[in-house]
């Protein structure tokens, strides 16, 4: 515990971008959890006489075409992005761990079927197209959006886990566990997964950035959460028609998406430096 506590401040000094990303993520999470407390106005309140107002003391980020406060909608929109992003990563990571572990551990025909047929079939189509087709068929909504984005998201985790399990299953500690009569499930869960989880954690952090960007893309296309629920992607879509006369409708949601994506990418880089022994030696951690 002390080594970890010592390494974290050093990591922050050697990788200030990771520290910045962590601060931004904590900020987004706090805003998402306590959105009603931080939002200065009701995000769905329509005020047509004050539509398309520029940023002012009354509305720090201005108002949209219906007079709704953009700052309040940005704060409530962080709820959708954080919830959808974390749910997509959780579902994709679980499926990837299960499929990748089984394929890598047992190998043979099962591995060839999963790797050559199933995974390549999903990788042959862009994940966003699969998500668009799924939501178009099932209808918009948070649950359908999470399922749609998870359909293509699990493959990357499965391939990473499969490659790690293929290398770990021949190690001495795995052979010793088998010799002592441990079941396959126990060998995978207790001995293999804990030793291969580090790159998976890094991939999950970077995957959060991709999931948030995918959610914004789906909402921009009108396939995310239905209105009047605030979403960064839908705010970008609403402000597209006023790009020249009221550019703040696009600028502030775009900055929110950019900061959220960058913060998780920075955290992924920081976790890689923290969890990789070679990177720790290079930076003196």
Image (cartoon, rainbow, N blue to C red):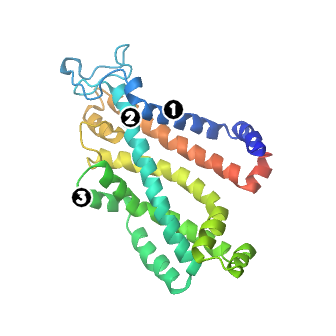
Look at discs 1 and 2 and give the one toward the viewer: 1
Q: Report the residue marked by disc 3.
A: 138
Look at discs 3 and 2 and give the one toward the viewer: 3
Residue located at (34% from left, 41% from top): 233
**Disc 1 or 2, which lies upstream in sequence?**
1
Q: Is residue 43 left or right of residue 24?
A: left
Label 2: state its secondary structure: helix
In the rendered image of this protein, does residue 3 appear above or below residue 190?
above
Q: Is residue 64 left or right of residue 109?
A: left
Q: Quadrant of residue 101?
A: bottom right
Q: Is residue 19 left or right of residue 253?
A: right
Where is residue 277 shown, x and y percent of the image? 75, 55
- Distance in Å between CA atoms under marks 3 and 2: 27 Å
In the rendered image of this protein, does residue 99 appear above or below residue 127?
below
Residue located at (42% from left, 54% from top): 88
Q: Residues within 10 Å of mark 3 (few under 14, many from 20)?
A: few
Residue located at (47% from left, 77% from top): 114
- Distance in Å between CA atoms under marks 3 and 1: 33 Å
Q: Report the residue marked by disc 1.
A: 27
User: Looking at the rendered structure, which numbered label has been put on residue 212?
Assistant: none
Q: Report the residue marked by disc 2.
A: 253
């Amino acid at each position: 515990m002390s080594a970890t506590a010592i390494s974290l401040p050093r990591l922050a000094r050697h990788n200030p971008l990771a520290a910045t990303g962590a601060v931004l993520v904590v900020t987004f999470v706090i805003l998402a959890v306590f959105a009603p407390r931080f939002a200065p106005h009701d995000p769905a309140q329509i005020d047509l006489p004050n539509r398309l107002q520029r940023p002012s003391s009354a509305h720090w980020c201005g108002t949209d075409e219906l007079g709704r406060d953009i700052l309040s909608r940005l704060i409530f929109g962080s709820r959708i992005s954080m919830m959808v992003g974390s749910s997509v990563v959780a579902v994709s990571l679980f499926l990837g761990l299960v499929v990748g572990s089984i394929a890598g551990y047992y190998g043979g025909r099962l591995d060839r079927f999963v790797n050559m047929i199933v995974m390549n079939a999903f990788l042959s189509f862009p994940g966003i197209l699969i998500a668009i087709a799924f939501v178009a068929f099932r209808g918009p909504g948070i649950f359908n959006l999470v399922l749609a984005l998870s359909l293509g998201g699990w493959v990357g985790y499965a391939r990473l886990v499969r490659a790690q399990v293929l290398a770990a299953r021949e190690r001495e500690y795995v052979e010793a566990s088998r010799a002592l009569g441990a079941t396959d499930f126990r060998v995978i869960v207790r001995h293999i997964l804990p030793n291969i989880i580090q790159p998976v954690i890094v991939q999950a952090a970077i995957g959060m950035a991709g999931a948030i960007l995918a959610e914004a893309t789906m909402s921009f296309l009108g396939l995310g959460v239905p209105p009047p629920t605030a979403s960064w992607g839908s705010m970008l879509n609403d402000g597209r028609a006023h790009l020249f006369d009221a550019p703040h409708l696009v600028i502030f949601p775009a900055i929110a998406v950019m900061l959220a994506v960058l913060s998780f990418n920075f955290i992924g880089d920081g976790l890689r430096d923290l969890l990789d022994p070679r990177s720790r030696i290079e930076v003196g951690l």
